[in-house]
């Protein structure tokens, strides 16, 4: 064999493939390091561990190399690359919001699509070079795309790109047409033409193909007194509740719908991004003993009116008006109700207007879930019960308040016992009240009565198939009972019903992934949670345990120390005592990960 032949036989064979390449770095990193070297390093490392790396993993990217303050990532799909970049930039903006201007870290990101050469784990070629040059030309906080990359995503990603024209890029032989997604501070919020809230437009969700889908927006308060907003909100929420009880409808949760209060909206765009076909909007004017309600149903593809009406009635007719609005919407959506579904939609639980108004005030406060608001809600529910002792929803609301006080340890008496009694009383008055079964499920779960908790939560979601908190609680109960695999699908259902779901849902999902030993997925999910809630000690402890199980000792130490900084009184013994796991080994599984990292003995 000739020496040339032998030499060729030992060389690796270069492979070619089409790939989307993302290149990123921190604008002004040298200045930041010069001002605070240790602090800058630690903050950038935290951004990577808690935001950047989890987002890349979630979008199936592969980190090719790290270069100080920069990184190069390969994706199989340019859509995935752009969606990942958007969410990273959105997360960085959120993390920067409380930082002084001169300490903020802003990423510049370039994305290209092209043929690359693969040598072991590294990649080369014009696709890589163009991405790097686009990154260098991007504004801080912005994303620049090549024309080829833009062509593949312009219809698939709901975002506004600016055509910057052809640019001469260093060491690239031909000019490259560049498109820029504007910096996050310049982007409007979802469906909003006027707001200045810093946020990227989200990737649109797909509407269900087998059922009509709708979002009911908060009704505008046209009363002279701004404090009457609770009443207009209550009307819209009751319509959401009614429609949610119809299994053949898909209804966006109140939590997401009410984020749009007081904003000028492009309803066609909003429907596309929430993945629904219809939007209901309206207004309420309450004066003396009279109320005027207007409502209109909009179809998403054209923005045209499907149905609209106005009601001028005595306040005592408010319940009849709500029933009429619901019937009109159901008819407009061509939904056929079974006799049982039709019966379930009749009546409001009370005919006492004052009791109803007290209930609306209590519900508004309790949904905020702060200690002060939950405490403030109880007198309103109690007053509603005094005015109408048969008002099941008021009993359910009061039961929820006591259960929340127990979960958060805000009440040192016996709120769980009170919540149990009230929930049972609500069910006795109205067996079809979903909130009563929801409150009862909470009580059973924290009393470690897992089968009863699952039964009650299933009943709540059967009565209200679009009840996102009910699905979340069912998922949590299944997880604590040892059925984490089933819980994952149910938690994902809750998040689809409520696209702006509470960040706690992500912790619940990560708990399931952790129990299933899917540590990498749990790390990615916890990273998303910490973007939204950086001060969650329980998520940081779970994240530390994940890293411990994977042997990432330094990453585990960082998260553990941060958890103790957030909550110096954090106690594993307390968690062992209160978490309602059916199998106590699940808590030991958490502790074992920390022990593997050398964090506990």
Image: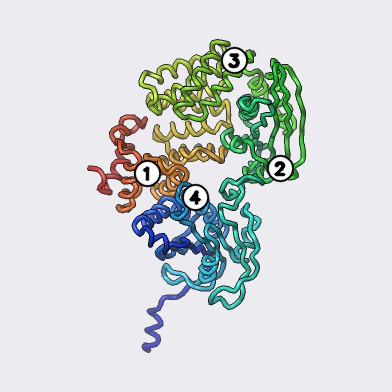
Residue 300, numbered circle: 2
Rendered residue at 75%/44% (across/down): 302
- Residue contact between numbered discs 2 and 4, judged by CB atoms under 8 Å: no
Q: CA distance from mark 2 to mark 3?
A: 37 Å
Q: Point out the residue furthest to the left here.
A: 601
Instruction: Of the two numbered discs 1 and 4 on the same chain, state the one appearing first in sequence.
Output: 4
Q: CA distance from mark 2 to mark 1?
A: 41 Å
Q: CA distance from mark 2 to mark 4?
A: 29 Å
Rendered residue at 55%/61% (across/down): 139
Q: Disc 1 on helix, strand or loop?
A: helix
Give the number of the mark in front: 1 or 4: 4
Q: Residues within 10 Å of mark 2 (few under 14, many from 20)?
A: many
Of residue 246 and residue 597, the one placed in the foreground of this image is 597
Location of residue 170 in the rendering, given as x and y in whole percent from the top left corner: 54, 75
Instruction: Of the two numbered discs 2 and 1 on the same chain, state the one appearing first in sequence.
Output: 2
- Residue contact between numbered discs 2 and 3, judged by CB atoms under 8 Å: no
Can residue 18 be seen here? The reply is no
Q: Is residue 280 above or below residue 510?
A: above
Which residue was labeled with disc 4? 91
Q: Disc 2 on helix, strand or loop?
A: loop
Q: Is residue 255 above or below residue 526?
A: above
Location of residue 291 in the rendering, given as x and y in whole percent from the top left corner: 71, 21
Q: Point out the residue furthest to the bottom here.
A: 2
Which residue was labeled with disc 3? 355
């Amino acid at each position: 064999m000739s020496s040339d032949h032998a030499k060729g036989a030992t060389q690796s064979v270069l492979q070619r493939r089409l790939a989307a390449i993302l290149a990123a770095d921190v604008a002004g990193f040298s200045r930041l390091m010069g001002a605070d070297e240790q602090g800058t390093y630690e903050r950038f490392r935290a951004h990577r561990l808690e935001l950047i790396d989890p987002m890349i993993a979630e979008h199936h990217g592969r980190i090719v190399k790290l270069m100080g303050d920069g990184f190069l990532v390969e994706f199989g799909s340019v859509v995935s690359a752009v969606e990942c970049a958007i969410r990273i930039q959105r997360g960085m903006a959120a993390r920067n919001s409380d930082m002084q201007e001169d300490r903020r870290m802003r990423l510049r990101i370039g994305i290209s699509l092209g043929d690359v050469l693969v040598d072991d784990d590294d990649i080369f070629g014009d696709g890589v070079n163009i991405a790097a040059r686009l990154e260098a030309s991007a504004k801080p906080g912005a994303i620049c795309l090549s024309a080829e990359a833009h062509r593949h995503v312009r219809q698939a990603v709901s975002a506004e790109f600016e055509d910057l024209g052809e640019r001469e890029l260093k060491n690239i032989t031909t000019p490259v047409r560049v498109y820029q997604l504007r910096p996050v501070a310049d982007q409007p919020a979802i469906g909003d033409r006027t707001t200045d809230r810093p946020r990227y437009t989200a990737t649109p969700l797909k509407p269900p193909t087998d059922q009509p889908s709708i979002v009911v927006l908060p009704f505008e308060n046209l009363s002279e007194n701004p404090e009457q907003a609770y009443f207009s909100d209550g009307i819209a929420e009751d319509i959401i509740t009614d429609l949610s009880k119809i299994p053949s409808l898909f209804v966006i949760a109140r939590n997401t719908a009410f984020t749009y209060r007081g904003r000028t909206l492009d309803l066609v765009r909003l429907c596309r991004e929430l993945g629904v076909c219809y939007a209901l909007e309206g207004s309420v004017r309450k004066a003396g003993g009279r109320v005027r309600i207007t409502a209109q149903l909009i179809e998403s593809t054209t923005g045209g009116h499907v149905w609209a009406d106005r009601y001028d009635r005595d306040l005592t007719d408010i319940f009849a008006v709500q029933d009429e609005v619901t019937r009109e919407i159901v008819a407009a959506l061509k939904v056929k109700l079974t006799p049982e579904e039709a019966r379930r939609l009749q009546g409001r639980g009370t005919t006492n207007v004052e009791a109803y108004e007290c209930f609306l005030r209590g519900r508004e406060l309790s949904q905020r879930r702060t200690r002060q608001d939950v405490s403030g809600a109880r007198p309103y529910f109690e007053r509603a019960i005094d005015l109408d002792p048969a008002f099941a929803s008021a009993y359910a609301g009061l039961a929820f308040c006591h259960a929340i006080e127990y979960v958060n340890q805000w009440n040192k008496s016996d709120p769980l016992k009170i919540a149990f009694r009230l929930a049972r009383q609500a069910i006795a008055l109205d067996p079809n009240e979903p909130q009563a079964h929801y409150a009862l499920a909470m009580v059973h779960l924290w009393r470690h009565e897992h089968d009863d908790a699952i039964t009650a939560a299933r009943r709540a979601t059967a009565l209200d198939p679009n009840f996102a908190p009910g699905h979340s609680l069912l998922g949590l109960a299944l997880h604590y009972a040892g059925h984490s695999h089933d819980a994952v699908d149910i938690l994902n259902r809750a998040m689809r019903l409520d696209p702006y779901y509470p960040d706690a849902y992500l912790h619940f999902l990560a708990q399931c992934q952790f129990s299933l030993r899917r540590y990498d997925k749990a790390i990615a999910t916890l990273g998303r949670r910490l973007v939204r809630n950086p001060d969650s000690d329980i998520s940081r402890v779970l994240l530390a345990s994940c890293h411990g199980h994977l042997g990432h000792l330094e990453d585990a130490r960082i998260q553990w120390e941060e958890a103790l900084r957030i909550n110096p009184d954090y106690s594993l013994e307390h968690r062992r005592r209160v978490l309602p796991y059916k199998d106590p080994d699940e808590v030991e599984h958490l502790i074992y990960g920390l022990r593997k990292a050398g964090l506990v003995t």
